[in-house]
Amino acid sequence: MSSSNSKTKKPPSLTQMVIDELPDLFYCNLSDEAASHIAEFLSNLAFIFEGTRFAQIRRYHLSMIPDPPPPDPGQLDLFTDLPPS
């Protein structure tokens, strides 16, 4: 009976395994030099990823902004003549 349970139980995903191991990675003993190199690598990785996927990231964030309400015709628009800053 336990063999049927082991067949139905899904193994953890790679993402879940990495998340489970993160505390161990962050709190293990590292030299100052190793910590500096890892921080630099992660920063560069984030910059490269954001640079190559900027349009997608921006599109996603813009899609999360709710549409502005329609303008109220009874409300005066006081700032139409100002130049853009």
Image (cartoon, rainbow, N blue to C red):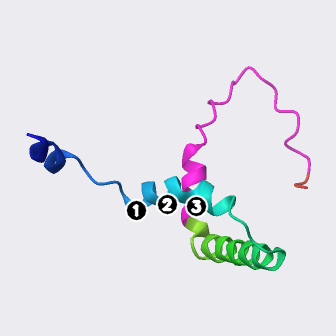
**Residue at the (62%, 30%) spot, across then down:** 70
- What is the quadrant of residue 50 in the picture? bottom right
Residue tagged 3: 57
* Total count of labels: 3
Q: Secondary structure at mark 1?
A: helix
Across and down, in percent, residue 35 comes to: 77, 72
Q: Nearer the viewer, residue 82 or 14?
A: 14
Residue tagged 2: 18
Q: CA distance from mark 2 to mark 1?
A: 6 Å
Query: Up-down: is 72 above or below 36?
Result: above
Q: Secondary structure at mark 3?
A: helix
Q: Is residue 58 visible?
A: no
Q: Residues within 10 Å of mark 3 (few under 14, many from 20)?
A: few
Q: Is residue 59 visible?
A: yes
Q: Residues within 10 Å of mark 2 (few under 14, many from 20)?
A: few
Q: Nearer the viewer, residue 54 or 40?
A: 40
Identified by mark 3, the residue type is Ile
Q: Residues within 10 Å of mark 1 (few under 14, many from 20)?
A: few
Identified by mark 2, the residue type is Val
Query: Up-down: is 23 above or below 8?
Result: below
Q: Nearer the viewer, residue 2 or 35?
A: 2
Tell me whether the residue at label 2 lies in contact with that at label 1, contact meaning CB atoms closer than 8 angstroms.
Answer: yes
Q: Is residue 26 magenta?
A: no
Query: Up-down: is 37 above or below 84?
Result: below
| Chain part drawn in magenta | 56-82
Q: Quadrant of the C terminus?
A: bottom right
- What is the quadrant of residue 13 in the picture? bottom left
Q: Secondary structure at mark 2?
A: helix
Q: Which mark is residue 14?
A: 1
